[in-house]
Structure formats: C-alpha cells, structure tokens
Image: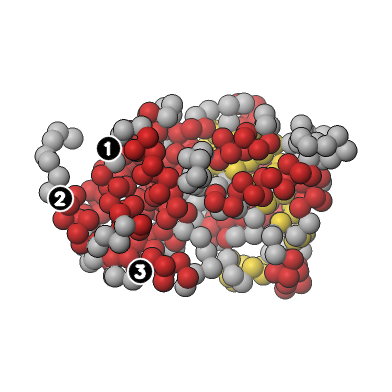
Amino acid sequence: MNKKIPYISIIGDGGWGTTLAVYLARKNYPVKLWGAFPEYTQHMQESRFNRKFLPGVEIPSSVEITSDLATSINDSDIIVLAVPSQFLRSVLKKIKKLSGTEKRSGISLKNKIIVSVVKGIETTTLMRVSEIVQDILGNVTFAAFSGPTIAGEVVKKIPTTAVIASKNIKVAKTLQEIFNSDTFRIYTNADVIGVEIGGSLKNVIAIACGVCDGLNYGTNTKAAIVTRGLAEISTLGTALGAKPKTFSGLTGLGDLITTCFSPQSRNRTVGEQLGKGVPITQILESTNTVAEGVETAKAAYRLSVKYKIPMPLITEIYNILFKNKSPAGAVTDLMHRKTHAE
C-alpha cells in the first residue's frame, strides 16, 4: 500500500457495510461508504443515519458517503466488498470498467487489497466470492472476512470475533492489525474456501432453524438442525478443497450458532415466517434487507447435485423455498429417512 494510513472504501451501504464504516472511522481510518442509489446516499450524507439498514446509529462525520464508484475505488488502498452476493458480479464489472484491467488510463487495482464480507454463492455459476472476483478482476490481492458478526452488536462494541482469510499471510496479518480492537478480536486463516463455504451455507441452516421456531418445536430439534447442518456444510466444503478443521472454528460452528439463534438474524427470521405458513414471496416483499440464505439454498442444492453429495437438510429447505413444500412435510420426510450411523 502506498499510504502510511490506509484509505478504506466500503462498497455497499447495507447494515454490515455501514457498521464497518462506523467501526473503522472510530479507529480513525479515513473511510468512504459507497451506495448504489444517489438520492439515498445524499440523504445519509446529510442526516448521518442509515435508517433503512442500521437505524439508530449515527455515522461519524469523517465517513464520506457517496454514490461515485470511481472516486471510491481510486482513493482507496483497501476495497471492502459488502454487497449481496447476487449483485456482486454487476458491481465488479463496474469496477473493472473503471480499472486498468480494461484500459490503460483507468484506475489500477495492482496495489489494492480486495476484502470480501459477502456471504453467498452465485446461483448461476455456483462460484464463491473469491472465484467471482478472480473471474472479473483477475489476479488481485484478496481476503475473505467472516465470522459470527451480528452488525447491531459490533456497532454497540459488544465483544465479537471474526476471521480474515487469505492465501497471502502477510495480507491477512495487515488486515488483522487494521480491524482488530479491544472489542473486535480478529484471527487469521489461510483456508479461503472453508471460510467462504462456512459463511455462506450457515445462512441456509439458519432458515431451517427459523422454520423450527415457526413450527414451535423445541431445543432438541434445533440442536439436531445445527449439528446435522454443520455436517452437511463440512462434507461439501471438504469436497471443494476446504480444510475440515475450519468448520469447527469461528467461520463454521461459530457463525452457524450466531445466525441460527440470534433474534436479529435475517435468515432465521425468514425461516420463522416460513414455519408460520407465510409464503416466501410475501416475506421477501416485506423487507428492505437481503436474506442471503434464500438464493444460497438454491446454489447449495445445485452443488450437492453436481458433486453427488447427499445434503438432506439443505435439500428440504430448497424444497420449501422453491418447490412449495410445506415445512411440516419437510420435517416428516427428514424424520423418515433411512436410518444409518452418524
């Protein structure tokens, strides 16, 4: 990086992107927060609040809020991707258009670090975020940031932990130093695949736990969902090249527990509404936020078919979401599967 104090751009003004902008500004880093809609970013710039996605939290005056992607990319040493996974490719294409990957006079990404806080898998290509980034931007310096991180708790300075994963350990340690604090402890990891898979598929299992809540089932059921769900995540992840140990860590079990049990979890809430009989179309129309687990369920199901890996729990969530199967019927079918050893 070419500056002593790195300039950081957060690409995506949702709850998590805004939280990171607030958090880093409190650590006295120069931060830009980019949003796709000029009217809304102007409103945030003037009011200093993101009422849609992070209500009640004042954004420090030092955070520059903008819809100008060119200046956001050009001025930054670290680019944090914080847009929903299904919109990521289109945003990356805009970045590519602005960068030297398409024209010599463009913005160079050579000395910049790309950090993803996106938790999802592209449904059309079945690519993880790191693969999408490489597909569009080429061989850039990349890291994945994941873990049990409810935005509302991080911004309130409630003790939280997370992981930064990169194949380049020096990059991971640099980012660890930037993001680490008394209330936010950051670990490093080299297993990018495992961190991405754990962070993505836990959202699908959280929907299953929400269905459990909506059906008024108990702790026994929820414990079974979390345990068997983790087994499915681990089985698919290792088949894709991840290290098994990653799934017992913060970005596997840790993130899974948080998302499955927190009342603030968007994916668990979606599942709860499904369990109560609300159609998925109605659920999605009634919220401003994106529940990544819905589209990830489709991607995870397709991956299970592609790699011939049985994933019964994720398959039933896919059936509920996209095949109009009743939640109670899905539970019955799961309980009547052929018995076998754990």
Give how far across and how far down residue 60 sits, in percent: 72, 62
Is residue 295 rendered to the left or right of residue 50? left
Instruction: State which tag comes first along the sequence, 3 or 2.
Output: 3
- Three-letter amino acid code of the residue under disc 3: Pro
Q: Residue at x 84, y 40 (%)?
A: 106
Instruction: State which tag comes first along the sequence, 3 or 1.
Output: 3
Give how far across and how far down residue 338 sits, in percent: 12, 41
Q: Is any part of residue 106 visible from this angle? A: yes
Instruction: State which tag comes first along the sequence, 2 or 1.
Output: 1
Give how far across and how far down residue 34 sits, in percent: 71, 56
Name the residue beneath numbered marker 2. 335
* Distance in Å between CA atoms under marks 3 and 1: 26 Å
Determine contact: label 3, label 1, CB under 8 Å: no
- Three-letter amino acid code of the residue under disc 1: Pro
Name the residue beneath numbered marker 1. 310
Numbered circles on residues, count: 3
- Three-letter amino acid code of the residue under disc 2: Met
* Distance in Å between CA atoms under marks 3 and 2: 23 Å
Q: Residue at x 45, y 52 (%)?
A: 295
Badge number at residue 279:
3
Q: Nearer the viewer, mark 2 or mark 1?
A: 1
Is residue 97 rendered to the left or right of residue 120? right
Image quarter in which the C terminus is found: top left
Give 139 or 323, whichever is nearer the viewer: 323
Q: Quadrant of residue 76?
A: top right
